[in-house]
Image (tube, rainbow, N blue to C red):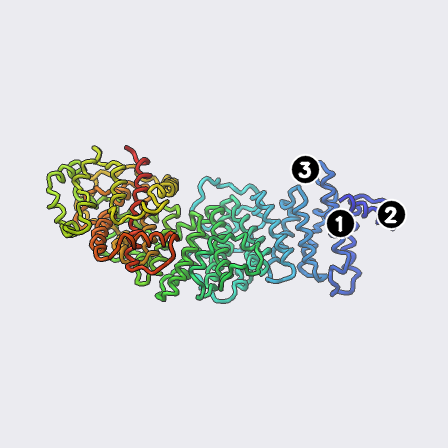
Amino acid sequence: MFSKLTALLQQAVDTEEEPIQLLDSFVSHWKGITNYYIVTTDETLPVKQTDIPWRLRQMVDILVYEEKQMERGETGPCMEYLLQHKILETLCTLAKAGYPPGMKQQVLVLLTKLLGQIQQPLLPHINVHRPVQKLIHLCGEGLGSKMEKEEVQFLTTVCAKLSQDPYLINFFIEKKNSADSRKLLPCSFGKSEGQPKDAVRTGTPLSSLATGISPLHSDQSPVTSIPFASIKPDGKDGQPDKSLINALLTLTASEKNQFALKACEGLLLLATLPEEGTARYMVESTMLRQTLADKLSYLYRQIPDTVDPGQIELLGRVDWRSHYAASNVEDAESFPGKGAVTFFFSWLDYCNQLVKEAHEVTAAAVAQEIRKRFFVTVLEPQLEQVSEVGILLSTALLMGVVTHITSSRLLDELVFFLLGDEREAEILTQPACHKLRSLLIERCNHLSDEISIATLRFFEQLLQKPQEHIIYNLVLRNLIGRCYIGNNTGYEERAAENEQLDETEEFEEDPFFTDIYTGSRFPASDWLVAPAAMQKTTKADGKPEVNRIVNSFLCLVPDTVKTSHLVAGCGYDTYLVDAHRMFQGCCVNAKEWKWPLSRSNLESCDPGGVFYEGDFLKVLFDRMAQILHQPYDLNLQVTSVISKVALFPHPHLHEYLLDPYINLSPSCRSLFSIIVRVIGDLMQKIQRIPQFPSKLLLVRRQLMGLEPENVVDHTTILKGVIVLEEFCKELAAISFVKYPSEPD
C-alpha cells in the first residue's frame, strides 16, 4: 500500500505539480474518470484500454489507506467526498449503460474491494446501499457471461456483510407496489419461537414489504425438460425478479463449479439470518424454495435409466462442497451416469444443509416444497413403476436420498411421505391407508430376490435414522396395547398353570411339537426345552432372568447342527461389542422420544383386542419362516433388518421380540416361535442329507474364505442353517446388552 502511495506522489513530482494531499489525489482520479466521458469520441474502446481501471484501483487504495490513518469510528475526507458526491451511484449508472464496454466488470471489482476492505460499516449509508442494490439488479442476467466471476465475488461479499449485521438485509428487501403492501402475509411455515416481534432494529419495517405472494401449496406448473440453467424466477409483469437471492439462485446454475459453489455459499449465509421477517420474505417473496426443489427434480430426471444400482450404493455420501470443488475430469472409479448421480446427490446434500442451518421458517417452507415438487411429483411415480430394472434403480436412489438427508425438518417430510402419518394399530382386514408404504413393504417379499434385498436394505437404512415415527409407524403402533399376551394374568399364574400341565399334552397342541422325531438321529428331547421348565426361572415381577433368555437363544439351534465352535473367531462374544455399540446409538436417539421405561399394565389393555403384528413385521416373519429355502444374501438382509428392529429400547418391542416366555394369544406368533418352527423343519430335512455335518462345516469355511468355492449339494439349506445359528447368537447378544438398561 505504501509503495502505491509512493508511486502516486512520484507521479505528481514527475508532472512538476506540487505535492498533493490524499483528498486532492482522490478527487483528481475521479475527475480523470469523468473527464474521459467528456473528451472521448470512441464509444467502442474497451474499458481495459483506458486509464479508468487504474484510477478506480487508486481510489480504493486511497480510501483503505485513509481509514488506517483515522481513529476508529471516524470518517476521512475522501470517504466523505465519495458519499456526498454520490460517486457509487454514478458508477452504477455507467455500469448499467455498459460504457465503455466492460465498465460493469470494473464497478463490480471496485464495490467488492470497497465492501471487503473498508472496516467501517458502509451499507447503512443510503449512497452505498442504494447503488449496491442497483448493481445487484445487474447480476445474474445471463449464465456463461464473462463477468460471472466478478458477479459472484460481489454478491458473496454483500452476503458476508449481511451475515455480520443481519439487520442490513432490510435495505435489500424489495418493496412491492401493491394496495395491501402494508401487510405481511400470514406465515404458513410454522412460527418462530423465541424471536422478538421487533427483531428488525432499523430500516424500513418488513411489515410493509411482502405482498402479492402465492401461498405455499398453490398450483405450480410442472418442471419441464428444458435445462435448469434457463429457468429463471419471474417478477412483476413476467420480468425476471432481480433481488439478491434470485441473482444468487441464477448463478448456482453456472457451468463453472467454483462460481456455483460461491453462489451456494452466499445463499446459505442469507438463509441463516436470524430475523423472522427476513425468513418470511425469503420464502414468500423470492423463488428460493421453488428453485431449490425444481432443480432437485430436474437433476433426478437427468439420471440415465441405465445406471447400475449397485454402483449408486457404492458411491456413498456426496458432499456438495467437495463435489463443486472437484475437477470435472472423470476419476478412475467412474461408471456410466456417475456425473448425473453425483450432481443430484450433491444438490440434495446442499438442500439438506440449507434446511438444517436455515431459520426455522425458511427450513419448514423449503422442506415442504421439496416434498411437494420432488418427493410427490417426481420420486413417487418412479417408485411405483413395475419394471424390475426401474424398481431397482429407483430403490437405490431412494436409499441414497435417505442417506443424504440428516436435517430433522427434511427427514420428517421424507418419512411422512414414505410411511404416512398413521399411528393407530393396523387391522388385518382393512386395506392399507398409505399406498406407498404398503407397496414398499410388499416388495420385501417380492418374486424377485434382488428387489426384496434392495427394499429390505432400504428399510434397514431408514430404521437407522433418528426419527421416532419410523419405528412407531412400522412396528410399535401394533404393540402398544400388548394384545399379543394371551390373557391378563401375570407370569406367575401362567407359570403355575404350565407346571400342572403334562408336557406331552402341551406339545401335542402344535404339529411341530409331536413325537415325529422318535427314533431319528436327532430326537426332539435333545433340543427342545419344555416351556414349563423354563417358566420356573421367571422372576417374581414377571421378567425372565437375562441369562436364561440368552441361553434360550444360544441353545435354540441344536448342537448337532452347529459349526461355529469348529472355526476360530465365530463365538457369541463377537456379537456383543457390535450389539452394545448399536444399542447405545438407539438409546441416544430414544432419549428425545420419551418412551416408557416399563411395560404398561395388562389391566389397562383391551382384553378383547385382536392382535396383528402389522404389515412390516408380517413380511419379516414370513421371510424368516422361509430362511431354509431362500438365497444366502436375502437371509442376511432379513436377519439384519430384524436385528435393527430388536435393538430399539421400547419395553413392548423387547418383550414381543426377545422374550421367549411370554404367553402368546391364540394364532399369534413371535420371533422365537417362528425360529422354533424353522428348527423343527430343519431337523426333518437334514435326515435326508448325507454327510450333513461335514458339508455344513465345508460351507461355513467357504463363506469365511477359508476354502475354495466348490459346488456342494443342498447349498441353500446349508447356508440357511449357518445364518440361523449366527442370527440366534446375535439375538442373544442383543438381549444381553438390553436387559441391564431396563429397571428392575
Q: Which residue is mark 2?
A: 13
Q: Which residue is mark 3?
A: 73
Q: Nearer the viewer, residue 688 or 727?
A: 688
**Residue 175 picture location, percent across and down:** 55, 53
Q: Nearer the viewer, residue 100 or 306?
A: 306
- Could you tell me the amino acid type at mark 3? Gly
Mark 1 vs mark 2, CA separation in Å: 17 Å
**Residue 399 picture location, percent across and down:** 41, 55
Q: Is residue 606 visible?
A: no
Q: Are marks 3 and 1 in contact (CB under 8 Å)?
A: no
- Could you tell me the amino acid type at mark 1? Gln
Could you tell me which secondary element the residue under label 3 belongs to? loop
Q: Residue at x 54, y 52 (%)?
A: 321
Could you tell me which secondary element the residue under label 1 belongs to? helix
Q: Which residue is mark 1?
A: 58
Mark in the foreground, 3 or 1? 1
Badge 3 crowding class, 10 Å Cα cut-off, few under 14, some 14 to 19, many 20 or more, is: few
Work out whether 291 lies above or below 200.
below
Mark 3 vs mark 2, CA separation in Å: 33 Å
Q: Please give the count of numbered marks on the rendered protein.
A: 3
**Residue 488 picture location, percent across and down:** 17, 40
Badge 2 crowding class, 10 Å Cα cut-off, few under 14, some 14 to 19, many 20 or more, is: few
